[in-house]
Amino acid sequence: MTVPAFNTVAWFQVGTDAPAEARRFYGEMFGWNISVDPDVDGYDLINYPGSPEPVGGIQHNADASDNHAIFIVLVEDVDAACAETERLGGKVAVPTQSNQNGLRFAYLDDPSGNRFGVFTPPPAQG
C-alpha cells in the first residue's frame, strides 16, 4: 500500500441522505467502484478503477441537513492541526475523535467557514 505524503488531500467524503443514489451517480459518472465498509455501519468505500486501496467514502446521513462533500488531509498530528487552525483564524468544528481502529480525525473550518477534515491513520499493527 502506498501512503500519501503528510499535508496532502488523502481522502474525500460525500455525505448523503440518499446513499443508493450517490452510489449510482458517482459510479456511473466516474466509473468509481463503491462497496459497503465492513468496519463501519452506514458507510461505503470508494475505489478508483485499478486502485487497490479506497480513496474516499460515502457517509449515510439521516436527513439532507447533513449532506456534504469534503476533502480530508493526512497530517502527522490531529491535535496540532486543530491548534494551528485556531492560531491562523479558523475554527475547530468537530474536535479530535478516534474510530474503533485507532484512526484519529477532526473537522475544521477555515477563516471563511469552509469545512475540511484532517486525519492520522490507525497505528500500524505489529
Image: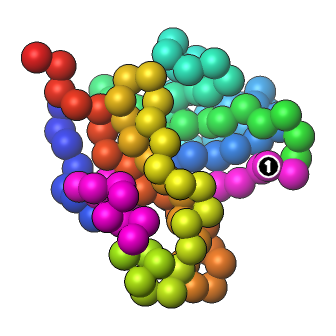
Q: In which quarter of the image is the N terminus?
A: top left
In this rendering, the answer to whether 92 lies above or below 36 is below
Mark 1: few/some/many CA within 10 Å (<14, 14-19, 20+): few
* 85 relative position to 76: left or right: right
Q: Quadrant of residue 59?
A: top right
Q: Where is residue 33 in the image (x, y as percent from the top left)?
A: 51, 28
Residue 47 seen: no
Q: Position of residue 60 (x, y in %)?
A: 73, 32
Q: Magenta stretch: give its range.
A: 65-83
The color scheme shown is rainbow
Residue nearest the viewer, comparing 22 with 122: 122
In this rendering, the answer to whether 70 lies above or below 97 is below
Residue nearest the viewer, comparing 47 with 111: 111
Identify the residue at horizontal 62%, vertical 36% (top origin): 58
> Magenta span has 12?
no
Identify the residue at horizontal 53%, vertical 54% (top origin): 95
Residue nearest the viewer, comparing 106 with 24: 106
Q: What element carries label 1?
A: helix
Q: Position of residue 36 (x, y in %)?
A: 58, 18
Residue that mark 1 sits on: 66
In this rendering, the answer to whether 122 lies above or below 113 is above
Q: Where is residue 42 in the image (x, y as percent from the top left)?
A: 68, 23
Residue 119 seen: yes
Q: Quadrant of residue 121?
A: top left
In this rendering, the answer to whether 73 lies above or below 50 is below
Extreme residue toward the left, this view: 126
Q: Quadrant of the C terminus?
A: top left
For badge 1, the amino acid type reads Asp
